[in-house]
Image (spheres, grey):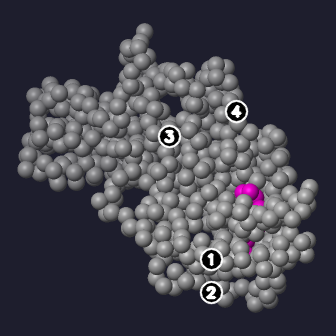
């Protein structure tokens, strides 16, 4: 099932374009939600997932609303709660399940787990565990895009916690000094593991830090995918025009613990309740129905299709073999 | 016209930049100033700001940006102003660059140049030999040339290699040694050690500036009838273990020498390899001459006491020869 098949142009003109974007956003956000739910709430509990599980429940609008703006030349560096970037770039859910299960069918062939994966053919760079390590790397990828004479942009994703690391500051500074085409996309989900953002930084917004590096920055409602898309469009246009980097802070909330083993008892209950009302998928569906871009029945049918897609993907992943121990020594160096 | 070790590195960089438009330089003060040691003097004028990128004082960003550019198919050569500052870019090297190929099949064809070593009264932060942090990190290649010929040939191979390479160039050799180099293009393969003096009494296995200390000691010992073979490792990772074992089999006695401090130094790994592979050929204990386990001291009498020298090698070699 491709996103295009779900797009039903009820309306023409600008409204039609918006409707088409909304349909694509809804598909990718829903797919990410269902895949992550299946991983965290079913496969992990069944013992079928190897290692840690870090999901982006409640944050789906951020990877979706931004990566839909990426062109083929662009490079994306998704963080661990940005699974939808892979879907938007054409990676099937089956390969992501295989990745989480430590199978050969995963993007790292069992060499690494969860969202630690990439594929330079798709221009997706794999993160490492150290937060913000990808930020200087994004600057370098953007330097290459400029060096190679393209109009490409690097999309660099991270959370609020990552902005405390030196790499974040070194990377933003270098990108700004060199006027590199990078869009820095922060999912400010209020918590870095158990640490609230108030203990992460003394400024109000992550966006406050942009001007200190000469980088324009803005705050956007990260649970409104169309708002993220619009802000992302401004950010990408700025970078693509050769004006240098742009910092986009998307305010959101991590509707889960840090990982599947974390009950997040440190999060006050009223915060959960408050943010549950702002669920980005429910909000988009409501808006689309109100605008006449879809119907409740269509939404339900689409969700049923996604569930089938997820079932098939899980089956594929479970049939993918574990890596052969004889390959242990391969690919440390070029062979 | 003999070429210095520094000039050899410079020529290697220059020729690779002329040969391959994807090669570019990135680092602190490498452009208008030509680098702290002037290795890249004149490069900005020749190749322009696009290919000679002066950066803020941000070692982690220099390495990280090199990785990003390398993933995109460019061949960055990053300069650490002194190898002592490479620790500021440590995470990018050992967690990002070293593991990309193994994890997700992505090539990171970068070179990180790092002027290293003591003997110039640089003190604790301008004299260190941090190569072992990287030798023990799978996925990295580590090079430490001793001669002008090798410095030029190895920097070229490092640039052409599709894996991350750390290139430790010894500051003390920059202008101290020189030799005539071939006028035509040549490379020296990574991962291959070289016998720089044939001998039969015992083997001195070493690298970098200590090759010259070993040769000096070998001359003194020759006058006493002790005929030393000297093996220059040239590349520390991947290590040429076959060459190490071969010289040990030939002479049956081994002295391991490095300027790096002792604990966790390469000598320990070499000793273990020799014990595992050629134990039955050995006629004496494997001995080490290294710097002691201290920071590199500043004042000349202290630094002289710290650094291995020919006198220390001669004394240890005599003992081993008598054993």
Q: Mark 3 points at which residue?
A: B109
Structural distance between the alpha carbons of marks 2 and 3? 42 Å
Relative vertical location of residue A94 with respect to residue B61 in this rendering, above or below: below
Q: Residue at x 83, y 62 (%)?
A: A9
Q: Name the residue under label 2.
A: A263
Label 3 environment density (alpha carbons within 10 Å; few <14, some 14–19, many ≥20): many
Nearer mark to the viewer, of 2 and 1:
1
| Magenta residues (range) | A58-68
Q: Quadrant of residue B203?
A: top left
Structural distance between the alpha carbons of marks 2 and 1? 26 Å
Dot 3 falls on which chain?
Answer: B
Q: Do the residues labelled 2 and 4 touch (CB within 8 Å)?
A: no
Dot 1 falls on which chain?
Answer: A
Q: Quadrant of residue A80?
A: bottom right
Labels 2, 1: one chain: yes
Q: Residue at x 68, y 30 (%)?
A: B50
Dot 2 falls on which chain?
Answer: A
**Front residue (pair A50, B312):** A50
User: Residue B205's spot in the image, x, y percent?
Assistant: 25, 39
Judging from the image, what secondary structure is the residue with disc 4 in?
A: loop
Structural distance between the alpha carbons of marks 4 and 1? 42 Å
Structural distance between the alpha carbons of marks 2 and 4? 48 Å
Q: Mark 1 points at which residue?
A: A307
Structural distance between the alpha carbons of marks 1 and 3? 42 Å
Nearer mark to the viewer, of 1 and 3:
1
Q: Do the residues labelled 4 and 1 touch (CB within 8 Å)?
A: no
């Amino acid at each position: 099932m491709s996103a295009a098949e779900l797009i039903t142009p009820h309306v023409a003109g600008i409204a039609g374009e918006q409707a088409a974007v909304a349909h694509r956003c809804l598909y990718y956000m829903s797919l990410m939600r269902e895949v992550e739910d299946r991983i965290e709430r079913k496969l992990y509990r069944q013992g079928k997932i190897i290692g840690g599980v870090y999901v982006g429940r409640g944050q789906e609008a951020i990877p979706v609303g931004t990566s839909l703006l990426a062109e083929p030349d662009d490079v994306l560096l998704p963080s661990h709660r940005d699974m939808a970037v892979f879907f938007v770039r054409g990676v099937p859910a089956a390969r992501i399940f295989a990745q989480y299960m430590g199978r050969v069918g995963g993007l790292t062939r069992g060499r690494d787990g969860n969202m630690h994966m990439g594929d330079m053919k798709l221009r997706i760079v794999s993160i490492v565990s150290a937060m913000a390590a990808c930020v200087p790397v994004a600057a370098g990828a953007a330097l290459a895009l400029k060096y190679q004479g393209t109009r490409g942009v690097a999309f660099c994703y991270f959370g609020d916690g990552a902005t405390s690391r030196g790499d974040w500051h070194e990377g933003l500074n270098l990108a700004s000094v060199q006027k590199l085409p990078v869009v820095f996309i922060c999912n400010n989900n209020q918590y870095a593991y158990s640490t609230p953002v108030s203990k992460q930084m003394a400024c109000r917004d992550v966006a406050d830090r942009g001007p200190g590096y000469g980088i324009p920055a803005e705050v956007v409602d990260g649970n409104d995918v169309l708002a993220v898309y619009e802000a992302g469009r401004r950010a990408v246009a700025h970078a693509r025009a050769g004006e240098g980097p742009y910092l986009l802070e998307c305010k959101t909330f991590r509707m889960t613990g840090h990982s599947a083993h974390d009950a997040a008892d440190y999060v006050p209950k009223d915060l959960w309740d408050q943010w549950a009302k702002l669920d980005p998928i429910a909000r988009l569906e409501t808006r689309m129905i109100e605008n006449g871009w879809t119907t409740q029945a269509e939404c339900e049918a689409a969700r049923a299709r996604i569930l089938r897609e997820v079932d098939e993907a899980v089956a594929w992943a479970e049939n993918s073999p574990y890596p052969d121990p004889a390959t242990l020594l391969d690919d440390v160096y070029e062979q | 016209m003999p070429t210095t070790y520094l000039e050899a590195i410079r020529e290697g960089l220059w020729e690779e930049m002329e040969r391959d438009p994807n090669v570019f330089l990135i680092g602190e003060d490498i452009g208008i100033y030509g680098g702290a040691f002037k290795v890249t003097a004149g490069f900005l004028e020749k190749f322009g700001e696009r290919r000679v990128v002066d950066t803020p004082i941000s070692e982690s960003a220099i390495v990280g940006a090199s990785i990003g550019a390398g993933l995109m198919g460019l061949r960055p050569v990053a300069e650490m102003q002194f190898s002592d500052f490479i620790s500021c870019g440590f995470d990018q090297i050992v967690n990002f660059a070293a593991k990309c190929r193994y994890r997700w099949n992505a090539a990171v064809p970068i070179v990180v140049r790092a002027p290293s070593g003591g003997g110039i009264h640089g003190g604790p932060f301008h004299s260190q030999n941090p190569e072992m942090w990287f030798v023990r990190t799978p996925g990295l290649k580590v090079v430490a040339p001793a001669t002008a010929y090798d410095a030029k040939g190895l920097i070229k191979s490092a640039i052409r290699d599709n894996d991350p390479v750390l290139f430790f160039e010894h500051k003390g050799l920059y202008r101290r040694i020189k030799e005539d180099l071939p006028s035509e293009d040549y490379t020296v393969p990574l991962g291959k050690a070289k016998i720089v003096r044939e001998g039969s009494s015992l083997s001195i296995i070493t690298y970098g500036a200590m090759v010259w200390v070993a040769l000096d000691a070998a001359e003194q010992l020759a006058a006493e009838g002790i005929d030393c073979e000297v093996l220059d490792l040239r590349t520390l990772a991947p290590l040429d273990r076959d060459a190490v074992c071969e010289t040990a089999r030939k002479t049956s006695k081994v002295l391991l020498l490095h300027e790096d401090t002792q604990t966790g130094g390469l000598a320990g790994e070499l000793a273990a390899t020799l014990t595992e592979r050629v134990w039955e050929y050995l006629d004496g204990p494997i001995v080490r001459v290294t710097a002691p386990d201290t920071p590199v001291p500043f004042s000349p009498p202290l630094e002289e006491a710290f650094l291995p020298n020919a006198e220390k090698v001669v004394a240890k070699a005599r003992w081993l020869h008598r054993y």
